[in-house]
Amino acid sequence: MIKIEQYYKICNQKQLIQNKTFEKSIAPKISIITPIYNRETTLKRYLRSIQNQAFNDLEIILINDLSEDNTSQEIELLKKEDERIILIQNKQRRGTLKSRNIGVLKSKGEFLLFVDPDDLISENILNFCYIMAKRFDYDLIRYNLYMGNYLLNSPDIVNNIKNKPIYKTNIFSFLFYGFGRLFQLDYFITNKLIKRNLYIKALNSINKYYLEQFMIDCEDGLINFMLYKLSDSLYFTKKIGYFYIKTNTSITHESIDFKNRLKSNFLYFRFVFQMTKNNNIEKNIANYIFSEIYNFREKTIIKLFQNLSTDYSFYLETINLYLGNDFIPLNSKRILKNLKNVILSGESSIQWLIL
């Protein structure tokens, strides 16, 4: 495997390593789906990581989500060198979740791969995943995700996993109690190759209310939950398949839209609760997700409520759903009750959360 630093330099080159031509396929085996918002400077690097793959029988669906920079012009230039690119122009801002699903419905591939426009897929990962999925009829291949800054310094392998096939009878038990701890949260949709028909089935199993929301947090969690729930077979590989490049302008780190970010988190809490309310084991997972996200985003939530001015009925209703069930432990109930009291009292500060 090429060293990560060297691979990053290769993808940043203006020209391909080899002189290749890319022709449009009538029946592509893999559809790569990429929503884009203001990413003119990273698009070529992203595309190079796809073009340098040994596997070429694919289509690249770019959904331009009303970008305000030169993203559209950059895509048009890239289309001239790669006929596999299909451009969809949103007429209004849709957000990542809706844009991805627009791309999925347009796609023709047997498998789907989601790649963000400022990230890279690792060398030869498409070939490996496709061969494994076809040979053993896996619904989903999940690989390791490498996270670092734009220089790929201080890397972190997210949810590090070893080679392991998992089948229907123990998918849930493995995910809920795997790796020596309760439920391995999977925050990413970009670390897996997915059968298109499974993804469509997952979409059809999610209440349209959630799919129609503008979400900038937790949108991957909605789909991942259903993908795992509906899969017959998965394969987890220890291969690093994706380089998540952390940038100051990444949508995950933008903090200007307080209202949408907070609502996205609460939509996820509500979704998981409604999907698990009839199963005692899964109820514990709903609480686990709440605890993990709250602990991970505590400062963000504090800031959001300090800056939020809106109708609180949605938040109160979601909190009451959780408080009305016995599976919520005392610490979570304390947090939720305090949050409810703050909302009801109209206080602008929630310093109690920091104590």
Image: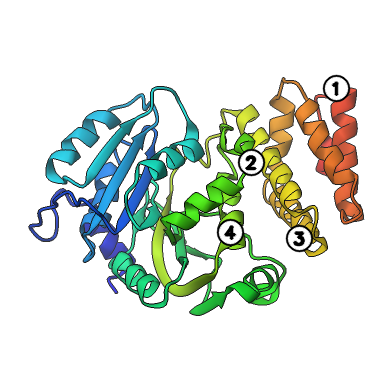
Q: Which image quarter: residue 52?
A: bottom left
Measured Cα–Cα span from mark 1 to mark 3: 33 Å
Residue placed under numbered mark 4 in the picture: 186
Can residue 54 be seen in this snapshot?
yes
Residue type of the residue flagged with mark 1: Gly
Q: Nearer the viewer, residue 244 or 174?
A: 174
- Of badges 4 and 1, the one in the foreground is 4
Q: Which image quarter: residue 255?
A: top right
Check the picture and name the quadrant holding the N terminus. bottom left
- Of badges 1 and 3, the one in the foreground is 3
Residue type of the residue flagged with mark 2: Asn
- Of badges 4 and 3, the one in the foreground is 3
For the point 56% across and 46% down, the residue is 204
Residue placed under numbered mark 1 in the picture: 346
Crowding at dot 2, Cα within 10 Å, few <14 / some 14-19 / many 20+, comes out as few
Measured Cα–Cα span from mark 4 to mark 1: 35 Å
For the point 34% across and 46% down, the residue is 107
Residue placed under numbered mark 3 in the picture: 282
Contact between labelled residues 1 and 4, with CB atoms less than 8 Å apart = no
Q: Whole-percent x and y of residue 173? A: 69, 72
Measured Cα–Cα span from mark 4 to mark 2: 20 Å
Marked residue nearer the N-terminal end (1 or 3): 3
Q: How is the image coloured?
A: rainbow
Residue type of the residue flagged with mark 4: Asp
- Of badges 2 and 3, the one in the foreground is 2
Q: Whole-percent x and y of residue 146? A: 44, 62
Report the residue that reaches farthest toward the left.
19
Please tell me the numbered disc located at residue 207: 2
